Image (spheres, rainbow, N blue to C red):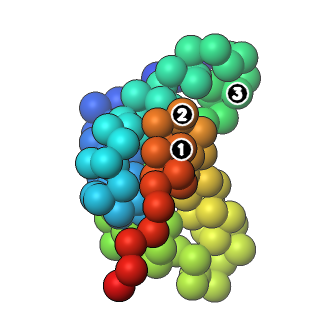
Amino acid sequence: MARLAFSVCERRFLERVADTLIPARATNATGINVLANIESSLIHASARHRRRVVRLVAWSYRLSWFYGGACMPIHARRSRFIAIQRLAHALSSLCLFAFWGDEAASRIIEQPRRPA
Protein backbone atom coordinates (compact mmCIF):
# COMPACT_ATOMS: atom_id res chain seq x y z
CA MET A 1 0.00 0.00 0.00
CA ALA A 2 1.31 3.44 -0.91
CA ARG A 3 2.01 6.08 1.71
CA LEU A 4 -0.26 9.10 1.86
CA ALA A 5 1.90 11.33 4.08
CA PHE A 6 5.47 12.62 4.22
CA SER A 7 8.12 11.14 6.48
CA VAL A 8 9.97 13.36 8.95
CA CYS A 9 13.01 13.50 6.64
CA GLU A 10 10.86 14.39 3.63
CA ARG A 11 9.15 17.16 5.60
CA ARG A 12 12.53 18.60 6.60
CA PHE A 13 13.70 18.29 2.97
CA LEU A 14 10.63 20.15 1.69
CA GLU A 15 11.20 22.96 4.18
CA ARG A 16 14.84 23.32 3.08
CA VAL A 17 13.89 23.25 -0.61
CA ALA A 18 11.28 25.96 -0.01
CA ASP A 19 13.91 28.03 1.83
CA THR A 20 16.21 27.61 -1.17
CA LEU A 21 13.59 28.65 -3.74
CA ILE A 22 11.84 31.45 -1.85
CA PRO A 23 13.83 34.35 -0.41
CA ALA A 24 13.82 34.61 3.38
CA ARG A 25 12.68 38.22 3.08
CA ALA A 26 9.50 37.08 1.33
CA THR A 27 8.66 34.37 3.86
CA ASN A 28 9.38 36.71 6.76
CA ALA A 29 7.19 39.44 5.29
CA THR A 30 4.25 37.09 4.70
CA GLY A 31 4.64 34.45 7.39
CA ILE A 32 3.72 31.73 4.88
CA ASN A 33 4.57 28.14 5.84
CA VAL A 34 5.03 26.28 2.55
CA LEU A 35 4.99 22.82 4.13
CA ALA A 36 1.75 23.54 5.99
CA ASN A 37 0.16 24.78 2.74
CA ILE A 38 1.22 21.64 0.87
CA GLU A 39 -0.14 19.37 3.58
CA SER A 40 -3.36 21.39 3.78
CA SER A 41 -3.83 21.08 0.02
CA LEU A 42 -3.23 17.35 0.18
CA ILE A 43 -5.94 16.91 2.81
CA HIS A 44 -8.48 18.10 0.26
CA ALA A 45 -6.95 16.17 -2.66
CA SER A 46 -7.91 12.73 -3.87
CA ALA A 47 -5.97 9.70 -2.62
CA ARG A 48 -4.46 9.27 -6.09
CA HIS A 49 -3.18 12.85 -6.15
CA ARG A 50 -1.80 12.51 -2.61
CA ARG A 51 0.10 9.36 -3.59
CA ARG A 52 1.60 11.14 -6.59
CA VAL A 53 2.76 14.14 -4.58
CA VAL A 54 4.20 11.95 -1.81
CA ARG A 55 5.99 9.86 -4.45
CA LEU A 56 7.34 13.03 -6.11
CA VAL A 57 8.77 14.27 -2.82
CA ALA A 58 10.12 10.83 -1.88
CA TRP A 59 12.00 10.43 -5.17
CA SER A 60 13.26 14.01 -5.01
CA TYR A 61 14.53 13.40 -1.50
CA ARG A 62 16.31 10.20 -2.56
CA LEU A 63 17.94 11.81 -5.59
CA SER A 64 18.83 15.03 -3.79
CA TRP A 65 22.00 13.36 -2.55
CA PHE A 66 23.34 13.43 -6.13
CA TYR A 67 22.12 16.96 -6.87
CA GLY A 68 23.17 19.08 -3.90
CA GLY A 69 20.61 18.33 -1.19
CA ALA A 70 18.09 21.12 -0.78
CA CYS A 71 19.48 22.81 -3.90
CA MET A 72 18.29 19.82 -5.91
CA PRO A 73 15.69 21.76 -7.96
CA ILE A 74 18.33 24.28 -9.01
CA HIS A 75 21.16 21.84 -9.80
CA ALA A 76 18.98 19.17 -11.40
CA ARG A 77 17.76 21.62 -14.04
CA ARG A 78 21.10 21.18 -15.76
CA SER A 79 21.01 17.38 -15.62
CA ARG A 80 21.37 15.59 -18.91
CA PHE A 81 18.55 13.28 -17.86
CA ILE A 82 15.17 14.66 -18.90
CA ALA A 83 13.35 12.74 -16.16
CA ILE A 84 15.51 14.39 -13.49
CA GLN A 85 14.89 17.82 -15.02
CA ARG A 86 11.15 17.18 -14.93
CA LEU A 87 11.33 15.95 -11.35
CA ALA A 88 13.17 19.12 -10.31
CA HIS A 89 10.66 21.26 -12.17
CA ALA A 90 7.71 19.50 -10.51
CA LEU A 91 9.25 19.89 -7.04
CA SER A 92 9.89 23.59 -7.67
CA SER A 93 6.34 24.05 -8.91
CA LEU A 94 4.93 22.34 -5.83
CA CYS A 95 6.82 24.65 -3.46
CA LEU A 96 6.17 27.82 -5.44
CA PHE A 97 2.48 27.01 -5.82
CA ALA A 98 2.22 26.48 -2.06
CA PHE A 99 3.79 29.90 -1.50
CA TRP A 100 2.14 32.03 -4.19
CA GLY A 101 -1.22 30.29 -3.82
CA ASP A 102 -1.53 31.65 -0.29
CA GLU A 103 -3.48 34.88 0.14
CA ALA A 104 -0.73 36.34 2.30
CA ALA A 105 1.57 36.42 -0.75
CA SER A 106 -0.54 39.26 -2.13
CA ARG A 107 1.11 41.52 0.49
CA ILE A 108 4.37 41.27 -1.44
CA ILE A 109 2.70 42.06 -4.75
CA GLU A 110 0.78 45.04 -3.44
CA GLN A 111 3.72 46.72 -1.70
CA PRO A 112 4.90 49.88 -3.45
CA ARG A 113 8.44 49.75 -4.80
CA ARG A 114 11.08 51.80 -3.07
CA PRO A 115 13.63 53.68 -5.13
CA ALA A 116 17.05 52.07 -5.08
Q: Nearer the viewer, mark 3 or mark 1?
A: 1
Q: Which mark is residue 26?
A: none
Q: Which residue is mark 3?
A: 49
The answer to whether marks 2 and 3 mark residues whose Cβ atoms lie closer than 8 Å is no
Q: What residue is rendered at 51% in x and 21% in y?
A: 40
Q: Amino acid at mark 1?
A: Ser
Q: Nearer the viewer, residue 108 or 111?
A: 111
Distance between the Cα atoms at labels 3 and 1?
27 Å
Classify mark 1: helix, strand or loop. Answer: helix
**Residue 73 picture location, percent across and down:** 49, 66
The answer to whether marks 3 and 1 mark residues whose Cβ atoms lie closer than 8 Å is no
Q: Quadrant of residue 81?
A: bottom right
Q: What residue is rendered at 28% in x and 58% in y?
A: 24
Q: Nearer the viewer, residue 46 or 106?
A: 106
Classify mark 3: helix, strand or loop. Answer: helix
**Residue 44 picture location, percent across and down:** 64, 14
Q: Is residue 95 visible?
A: no
Q: Which residue is mark 2?
A: 103
Classify mark 2: helix, strand or loop. Answer: helix
Q: Mark 3 vs mark 1: which is more N-terminal?
A: 3
**Residue 102 picture location, percent across and down:** 53, 35
Q: What residue is rendered at 38% in x and 72% in y?
A: 114
The answer to whether marks 1 and 2 mark residues whose Cβ atoms lie closer than 8 Å is yes
Binning the other alpha carbons within 10 Å of mark 1 as few (below 14), some (14 to 19) or many (20 upward) gives few
Q: Amino acid at mark 3?
A: His
Q: Amino acid at mark 2?
A: Glu
- Does 52 sit left or right of 77 as displayed? right
Q: Mark 2 vs mark 3: which is more N-terminal?
A: 3
Binning the other alpha carbons within 10 Å of mark 2 as few (below 14), some (14 to 19) or many (20 upward) gives few
Q: Which residue is mark 1?
A: 106
Q: Quadrant of the N terminus?
A: top right
